[in-house]
Image: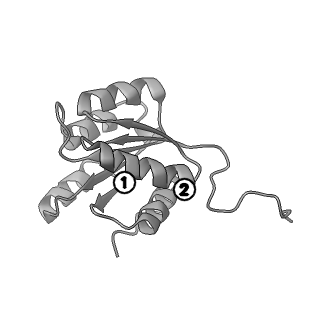
Amino acid sequence: MADANSQSNSQPAAPFRVLVADDNPQHTGVMRKILGKSGYEVKEVHTGEVALLEFESWRPNLVILDCMLPQKCGLECLEHIRNHPRAAEVRVVMCSAKTDIDYVLTCLESGADGFIFKPFEAHRFSRRIENILSGGKDEGEG
């Protein structure tokens, strides 16, 4: 039986590392704040090339990629990650205001574990990230 001082179920037992890649610092800041409240260790980057460098060196558990990153777009980064030897160890979520269903399907078929549309509600974003990191199926926007 758990005691009253144990962590709540919404807090990860060990801090998961989440790499957030978006060219807009306001977007990465919002995601950092939401994820930080849930106990995740978060690193922000603003280009696709830096995202791939940090993926290699920092070894995150989850990478959140904006689709429209400069230098290398989110889909290019996703394809690089999915062809990496660590591919099975890392979750990747695409995040964009782009709502073209064909693009969403391309991302999912290319190995994304989920797709989050911007703007998003903080509690839904947090719940979906927690579910994806725990190995659950992405519930989608609804």
Q: Quadrant of the N terminus?
A: bottom right
Q: Residue at x 55, y 46 (%)?
A: 40
Q: Is residue 70 above or below residue 138?
A: above
Q: Quadrant of the C terminus?
A: bottom left
| Foreground of the two, 28 or 86 | 28
- From the image, tell me which residue sits under label 2: 134
Image disc number at residue 113: 1
Mark 1: amino acid = Asp
Residue 13, percent from left and from top: 67, 49
Kind of residue at disc 2: Ser
| Residue drawn at the location 25% of the way across and 44% of the way down | 24
Q: Residue at x 59, y 49 (%)?
A: 39
User: CB atoms at circles 1 and 2 under 8 Å apart?
Assistant: no
Q: Residue furthest front?
A: 26
Q: Is residue 31 above or below residue 99?
A: above
8 left or right, relative to 76: right
Between marks 1 and 2, how big is the CA–CA gap?
A: 12 Å
> Outermost residue toward the bottom?
142
Q: Residues within 10 Å of mark 2 (few under 14, many from 20)?
A: few
**Side (left or right) of 7 relative to 27:** right
**Neighbours of disc 1 within 10 Å: few (<14), some (14-19), many (20+):** many
Q: Nearer the viewer, residue 30 or 85?
A: 30
Percent of width and height locating residue 35: 49, 52
